[in-house]
Amino acid sequence: MNKAELVNEISKVVSTKKEANEVLECILSTITKTLKIKVSVSITGFGTFKVVKRQARKGRNPKTGEEIKIKAKNSPKFIPGKALKDSLN
């Protein structure tokens, strides 16, 4: 499912596709803003979005085999909730 298909599903509950798109954009931007300040977002029954710090490490350029340094960075992580896991099995 892509974003357009998700907007179509949301539009079945709200009035218009425009309103559905605004709802989706609001949810996604709120999650993004919250993760930027390194606070996790928990949605009961669905899962938790959080930020994890990836340490600096050494890697290899697959084309040349040359060793390179990979900088430390923050990455988003999603941990599915029990209800989501149970619904899939």
Image: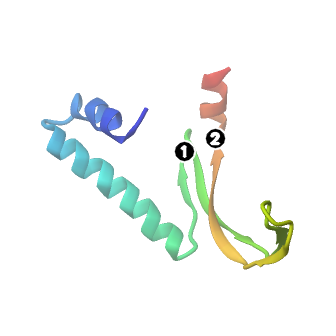
Q: Residue furthest top?
A: 89
Q: Is residue 85 left or right of residue 9?
A: right
Q: Residue at x 64, y 42 (%)?
A: 80
Determine contact: label 2, label 1, CB under 8 Å: yes
Q: Position of residue 20 (x, y in %)?
A: 23, 42
Instruction: Report helix, strand or loop for mark 2.
Output: loop
Q: Is residue 24 left or right of residue 52?
A: left
Residue 3 higher or lower than 26, as above or below: above
Q: Residue furthest front?
A: 64
Please state which of residues 53 and 57 is positioned toward the viewer in this rendering.
Answer: 57
- Residue under pointer 2: 81
- Residue under pointer 1: 44
Q: Position of residue 78 (x, y in %)?
A: 62, 51
- Give the residue type that dot 1 points to: Thr
Q: Is residue 25 left or right of residue 33?
A: left
Q: Earlier along the polypeptide chain: callout 2 or callout 1?
A: 1
Q: Is residue 74 left or right of residue 68?
A: left
